[in-house]
Image: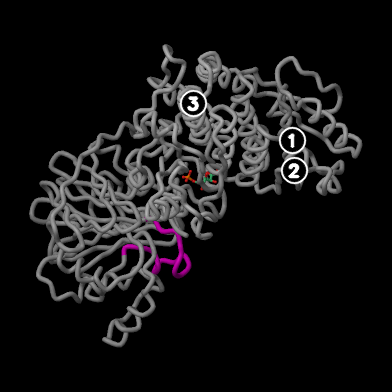
Amino acid sequence: MCGIVGYIGQKPATPILLDGLARLEYRGYDSAGVAVLAAKRSLEVHKVAGRVRDVMATLPAGFEGADDILSRCVRGHYMGIGHTRWATHGGPSDDNAHPHLSQDRRVAVVHNGIIDNAADLRKALIGDGVTFRSETDTEVLAHLVARAYADTLEDAVLEALAQVEGTYGLAVIDARHPDRIVVARNGSPIILGIGENEMHVASDVAALVRYTTQVVHLDDGELASVTLDGFRTFTWGARSTSKETVTVDWSYDDYDRGAYEHFMIKEIHEQPESVRRCIRGRVDERFHTAHLGGLNLDAREARGIRRIKILGCGSAYYAGQFGAQFIEEVARIPADAEPASEFRYRNPVVEPDTLYVAVSQSGETYDTLTAVQELKRKGGRVIGLVNVVGSSIARACDGGIYLHAGPEVAVASTKALTNMSVGFSLLGVHLGRIRDLSPANGRRLVDGLQALPNQIDAILENGQAITDAAQWVSKAQSIFFVGRVRGYPVAREGAQKLKEISYLHAEAYQTSELKHGPLALISPDVPTVAIVPDDELFDRNLTALHEISARSGPMLVITHEGVDVGDLAATTIKVPRNEPELDPILMTVPLQMLAYRVSVALGRDIDKPRNLAKSVTVE
Ligand code: F6R
């Protein structure tokens, strides 16, 4: 999805902007560009449909990154803005790439989001003699700012935004006001990075962490005027606001692949440590429960909860299904999960004694964010399970649990999802121990949670069987994933991971549902990946394996150490035993590896699968 960077400071701007854009590449994009302040108070723009490195190729000969011949030192400083675009209005092309310029090339704008009334504004501007160079909704902003009557850039941006309906995170520069970048936020993140004698702007901290860890998050309806010596924030009504500076604990190295071939496999291997981080400081050994200070929910309020509704999208929704199962089982509170993208459109009944839980890695998924906003508007109490500190969803919720997975770069989520399940487990134990979960069961689950990191390590160390299985699975066109009750969210996540990065068709079913239809599709060409924990449903699962085997369906069975499924399976992967309620967390790990290894075998673009973006900030 689209990304924004901006810089004003003593150093040449172009290399900093391009480096920032390269850090945002993981989000997915189709074009990129920069606009920098040049000599004689003009702007120089380089933009292309393609990669950030293609923008570099358009720079004048001799440009070597460190030695900036593009941006000029104007009045003792450098300034510029940059963008990675994910096409919405108008296909990927050089003209449609941002930044967009006003007709006199004095104003440049980069924008994330969608201007809903762009068509009407465009028509009116064309009627006034404006010539458009792109098909984008964003270009209207550049013309509106340039044509504003205001004397200051801040007022010109306010005047332009007063005419605009839609969502935006945007940054504007004006060669007539070379000492400032004006940014604004309405539904799409804008973050200010505070450096020494310099300021940065970005839509994602990934672009900032190389330069500063001190950041300020703008709120919706807020603008900032960013200058060399700091920033000033204000509202649409020009009323000044005060902001809190937050320290980011992610580092530049976190965005480095190191010796790993892909970010996805690096992030899979980071799971033992990221699970440790999620649990650290949250286990109460005395009362065998979890400490979750950020929930902003006291014990009396927690006792009053009669229902839990979990909302997320894609894999986060599947993690939510795990969470609902765990909480209902452990805390005995009726719980279910629903895709946030559906929930927000069906005019849901919002009940005062329901606790709503939004779950999101990025904290910026538009569907989940708007579901939270709809809930808040109706008076619902919402907590968040979110990975990115200070993100829109985290800030929109009444409280929550940060996942501490560290930055996740691969589009296919792995370590953040595992931490979502760990976060739900902590929540379930916390709520359970306030209600009827016994100290002995609390202890059992807390011990189980603490055993997870070493057990994940053990699964990762024994990856050869999965690598071998990937060879035969990758030859199929269509693959079934089956699991039941606790195993069903595991199957759904396994199918999701495989299809998004391998492009093979994969479908998940409850094992119990096979005989009600899908069994007709079982054949020697359609492998089944079966989740078969050694729990109270083992015998029933075994019956289904026999049914599949009787129809010559090849099987990959994920089960527990010590279990023997005979010759039913072509490959059996055995994971260590934890507690039955927590086993799904461990059983998901081999499926991440399977998706990865199958996709390696098929030569896919694993970290940036086709048609997908890391953070889905549009409808
Ligand atoms: C799958 C995947 C997506 C996300 C979904 C929600 O690997 O990454 O399905 O889970 O787009 O994203 P977040 O968690 O950022 O809200």
Discs 1, 2 touching: Cβ within 8 Å: yes
Q: Hey, which residue is sitting farthest right in the picture?
A: 550
The x, y position of residue 611, in whole percent, is 55, 55
* Residue 13 spot, x, y in % from top left: 23, 50
SS class of the residue under badge 1?
A: strand
Residue topped by disc 3? 435
Instruction: Judge whether residue 292 is colored magenta.
Output: no
Q: Mark 3 or mark 1, which is nearer the start of the sequence? A: 3
Disc 3 residue crowd, few under 14, some 14–19, many 20+, Cα 10 Å: some
Find out whether the residues at labels 2 and 3 contact each other: C-beta distance under 8 Å: no
- Quarter of the image for residue 501 reads top right
Q: Circle 1 is placed at which residue position?
A: 529
Per the image, the residue denoted by label 2 is: 479
Q: Which of 450 and 539 is in front in this view?
A: 539
In the displayed structure image, the side of residue 6 where residue 429 appears, left or right: right
* Residue 94 lies in quadrant: bottom left
- Image location (x, y in percent) of residue 460: 59, 23
In space, the residues marked 1 and 2 are separated at their CA atoms by 7 Å
Task: Answer whether residue 92 is magenta in the image.
Answer: yes
- Which residues fall within the magenta stretch? 84-99
For discs 1 and 3, the disc positioned in front in the rendered view? 3
